[in-house]
Amino acid sequence: MLVDAGPEDKSDLLLSTLREAGVVLSDLDHIVVTHSHQDDAGGLRAVQDATGAEV
């Protein structure tokens, strides 16, 4: 599970950091969005596309 997807312009950084930490992106099954501010949910589409996670 991932809580919040971060801002849209940081999606690549988030995904690469998760990979570097040993996270297999396809193993992420859920993304929880705490609220709809750009800095918390702006990257949701890119992260969901990369992981296939349910929101």
Image (cartoon, helix red, strand yellow):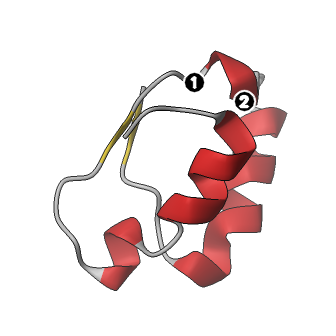
Residue for point 37% across, 40% down: 55
| Residue 37 as seen in the image, left or right of residue 30 | left
- Residue projecting furthest to the top: 27
Q: Which residue is mark 1?
A: 28
| Residue 45 as seen in the image, left or right of residue 39 | right
Circles 2, 1 touching at the beta carbon (< 8 Å): yes
Residue for point 46% across, 57% down: 5
Per the image, label 1 sits on a secondary structure element best described as: loop
Instruction: Report crowding for label 1: few under 14, some 14 to 19, many 20 or more residues within 10 A (C-alpha).
Output: some
Residue 30 sits in quarter: top left
| Residue 6 as seen in the image, left or right of residue 49 | left
Residue 35 sits in quarter: bottom left
The answer, for residue 23, to whether it is visible in the render is: no
Per the image, label 2 sits on a secondary structure element best described as: helix
Q: Tell me where residue 28 appears, x and y as whole percent.
A: 57, 24
Camera-side residue of 14 and 44: 44
Question: What's the amino acid at mark 2?
Answer: Leu
Residue 26 sits in quarter: top right
Question: What's the amino acid at mark 1?
Answer: Leu
Instruction: Report crowding for label 2: few under 14, some 14 to 19, many 20 or more residues within 10 A (C-alpha).
Output: some
Q: Tell me where residue 18 appears, x and y as whole percent.
A: 70, 39
| Whole-number angstrom distance, CA of label 2 to CA of label 1 | 6 Å
Q: Which residue is mark 2?
A: 25
Q: Is residue 15 above or below residue 22?
A: below
The answer, for residue 9, to whether it is visible in the render is: yes
Q: Tell me where residue 39 appears, x and y as whole percent.
A: 37, 78
